[in-house]
Image (cartoon, rainbow, N blue to C red):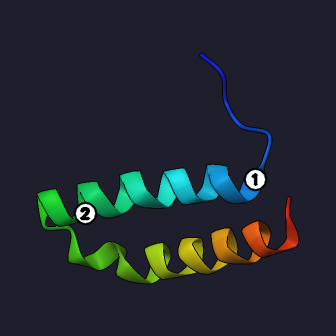
């Protein structure tokens, strides 16, 4: 299995998995954490890291 070295894409992948699980399991308390994760992923993707 090959993982990306781009931290922005890695954070985006973690965000998407976590968001999907939160929606599926009804875990509404995770939204602030998911928002922070989404912002961090966006910043790293824009920076190209």
Q: Provide residue 22's location: percent of width, then percent of height.
A: 25, 63
Which residue position is annotated with label 1?
Answer: 7
Q: Position of residue 10 (x, y in %)?
A: 64, 49
Question: Residue at position x 65%, y 54% from top?
Answer: 9
Q: Earlier in the sequence, mark 1 or mark 2?
A: 1
Tell me the crowding category of disc 1: few under 14, some 14 to 19, or many 20 or more residues within 10 angstroms, Cα based: some
Which of the 4 image quadrants contains residue 3? Answer: top right
Most extreme residue toward the top, as rendered?
A: 1
Q: Residues within 10 Å of mark 2 (few under 14, many from 20)?
A: some
Is the residue 2 above or below the residue 25 in the image? above
Q: Residue 7: x, y in percent?
A: 76, 53
Mark drawn on residue 32? none
Residue designated by label 2:
22
Give residue 11's position: percent from left, percent from top.
62, 57
Is 11 situated left or right of 43 in this image?
Answer: left
**In the displayed structure image, the side of residue 45 where residue 26 appears, left or right:** left
Task: Give the camera-side residue of 48 and 22.
Answer: 48
SS at circle 1:
helix
């Amino acid at each position: 299995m090959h993982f990306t070295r781009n931290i922005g894409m890695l954070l985006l992948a973690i965000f998407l998995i976590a968001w999907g699980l939160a929606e599926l399991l009804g875990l509404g308390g995770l939204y602030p954490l998911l928002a922070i994760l989404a912002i961090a992923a966006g910043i790293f993707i824009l920076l190209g890291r």
